[in-house]
Image (cartoon, grey):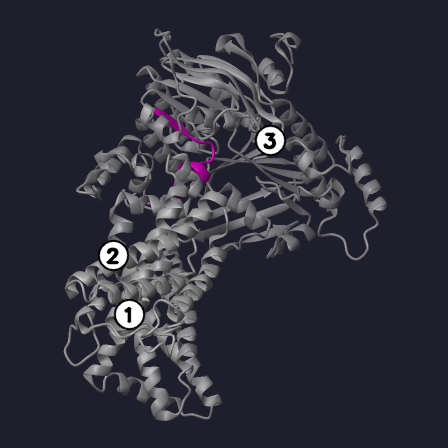
Amino acid sequence: MQAKLRDLLITNILAIVLGLVASGLMLLFLGKNPLSAYSVLITSVVRDGYTFADIFVKATPLMFTALAFAFTYKANLYNIGAQGQFYIGAVIAAAGSLLLQNILPGWLVLIITLLLTIVGGGLWGAFIGFVKARYNSNEFLVSMMSTYVALAIMNYLLRTFLIEGKAEYPQTDALAASVWLPRIIPGTRLHIGFVLAVLACVGVWVLLYKTTLGYRIRAVGYNAGAAEMSGINAKKLYILAFFISGALAGVAGFTEVNGVQHMLVQGFNPDLGAAGIGIAILANGNPIGIIFAAILFGALKVGGTIMGQMSGIPSSIIELMQGFVMVFVILSYFVRTWLENNREKRKLQKAVAK
Amino acid sequence: MGTAFFELRGISKYFAKVIANQDVSFSIQRGEVLALLGENGAGKSTIMKILYGLYKADEGNFFKDGKEIKIASPKEAMELGISMIQQHFSLVPAHTVTENIILGNVRGIIDHKLFREEIKRLAELYGFELNPNDYIRDLAVGVQQKVEILKALYQKTNLLIMDEPTAVLTPQEAENLMGFVRDFTAQGNSVIFITHKLKEVMSVADRIIVMRAGRVYGDIKRAETNELELSKLMIGRDLKWVTKDDRQESLDQEVRLEIQHVTLQEKTGVPALKDISLTLHKGEILGIAGVSGNGQQELCEIVCGAILPTKGRVLLDGEDITERKIRARIDLGIGYVPADRSSDGMIMDMSIAENMLLKSSYDKKWQKRGFIDKKKLNQYALQEIGEYSIKAPSPETIARGLSGGNQQKVVLAREVDNGEKVIVFDQPTRGLDLGAVNHIHQVILQERAKGKSVLLVSTELSEIFALSDRIAILYKGEIQGVFNSAELTTAKIGLLMAGFREGEVSNDAG
């Protein structure tokens, strides 16, 4: 067990280091000094509380979209439409808040809006599961295309019903401060949505591994044939898994609108869905691992932006960095298996020799 | 005797966590039939895959005619005249016999006519009735095997390795295969036969290598041994075989399960089952004999509710359950041990305890305040591990890491508990070692003694005869007849399995 834990730590750290080295080589091509770039990256994120807290602000929606991908992944389904479900959630959060903020007390509006985004994102996702179950359509394609539909709906609403009072830009009015998610640490942007995200990760873990529903979802994911043969209705679970997945991505819309943006702007956060898939893969689909992977990505994002401002390095280098880190982390799974097999083999050979 | 044709010296192979082969040494002479006998997991297939270049040995050397050789790939093995026919054939169903045989041995433009003639000649030489233009997908399994053999002969093989070749054959087809083996070796070629069937070994082998737990435990001439000695070497202890004498006659004649005129139409239009009517009494074992693929799986799935019949009814204790789906039938007390446990019976990536939960996850007894009652489940799994002597360190052990026999016991333990009234066993002992087979047979008889009704599908005639009260023979989706087991002989059942009707078969046939 101990050797396993040691492998896990060493290989993961090595993977991150190798990812940084590989992206450092890319920096050399740009004629920049990677060492000074990295020292900027590291010192910048810890230079003050506000920046440091922003890591967790950025990690919050990533946790939700990563969970959205990971959850269906456990049922051997691919939801790559988290971006669309996130937009649906964001639209509902903005509309709900604007509609109710002058009628009800702030805390009640927040709760109602949260529930509405869960239902809205969930139904948007459940549709994908439904067509999969009913017509055996490819959920990969349907979920991908549903993102564009969601985007179009958002754009349409931002130009019509939801457009700001001035009717100038495709964005909503600012939400009243009463319906902002409360800040956890004063003087930073860190809001309670982060706690919600961590709770969601733990909750999904409990759901998957501690309840019979999660058990059935995993059973269907591993072997749908054996699950069906055991009286488990896989099709029903497809719809349910997509509902939960869509709901999780939808909540990301809620935390972004009510926690960070305090309004809805056309086409904001366009890469949350894709980054979520990366984080889920990085964490091997483990909900607890997603917490750490999302924080890592959050740190790269915050540090990358500052690095771009300070050293003139294009901040898109961060995406390259994320890509390299991901590749090496995935490789480390194989390295760990190989290490373990070798260890067992040596143990065996030693036992035989005695 | 002189120098051995091929010799293996001190071969060892380690997989992670398992010793597959340890210090294995033996030789084979020209013109010899060598049987590699051992239980499943004894390392027979592994050692042969090493010889065939599919695996690399961790220790040891090979010799051909006294000279050391290296075998790094099947291609190199073939160049040395070694061919291996795997348990699962490697043929392309959408190609013809000719195309399959020349696959990998041709370049550029193919002169089909030339090859066809060549293969026809080769087939005639060995007395195989084969049309080189037939598509593999249209051929019976026995014929497909002949294609595999021809493929080996076409490559000028001197040493033919066959992995469990008779597992898929009817008794008559198996007899033909033995005939070929004798012809082939008479010409100075050698054959290695991997098997766990003692009878086969005694009928065809010249010499027998017995393997157990990755080591060689015996290297004996057939003439100097007998089945009893071999079985002792194979399993390392004495087994008390279940026979009919151990059983009391069935007393209860109350009908439990009735299948009335069940027909199952496949999408292709060919009925998988045609007008099947069967009755299963309380405390009775009804054996379903037949070559696999004649509708056995469909019959089992109709009983357990996985598929609904196109026509006909299924009754349990007089109640019509035709429309009830799987979950309802599980609740009614119908257990099912499917033939293919890895695809239908269990979830390989889950633990033993989780596999125990598979069919009863809706049952409140495994839940505590909405969560899985892990403690209770683990206790139950632990108890079953003990009761069925499943070799596993804990209930948390992942099923994939268990041997086939132990995996099967997990399924068995679960289904015996689920099937309070009826248990359907589809090939419950296929591919298992003797110890596990014996255990499973005992379990089946115990459940019968408790008054449960058992539907036993098997392609293994000895199993059918050893356990069944009555035997039905299934051929192309039709029942060829239902007999009391004492009424049948191996020869008669063999002919019924091959499609002959009762009127055409008398008891002294064959």
Q: State which quadrant residue A179 falls in.
A: bottom left
Q: How many angstroms separate mark 2 from mark 3 (CA)?
A: 74 Å
Query: Marks 2 and 1: CB-CB under 8 Å?
Result: no
Callout 1 amino acid: Val
Magenta segment includes B336: yes
Q: Is residue B247 visible?
A: yes
Give above or below for A89 relative to B40: below
Q: Position of residue A299 (x, y in %)?
A: 30, 77
**Eyeballing the image, is B337 above or below A100?**
above
Badge 2 amino acid: Leu
Mark 2 vs 1, N-terminal side? 2
Tags 2 and 1 both on a single chain: yes
Which residue range is magenta in the image? B334-350
User: Subunit of mark 2?
Assistant: A
Please tell me which residue lies in front, A292 or B10.
Answer: A292
Q: Quadrant of the N terminus of chain A?
A: bottom left
**Left or right relative to B481: residue A50:** left
Q: Residue at x 26, y 37 (%)?
A: B381
Q: Is residue B430 left or right of residue B493?
A: left
> Can residue B349 be seen from the camera position used here?
no
Location of mark 3 (residue): B205
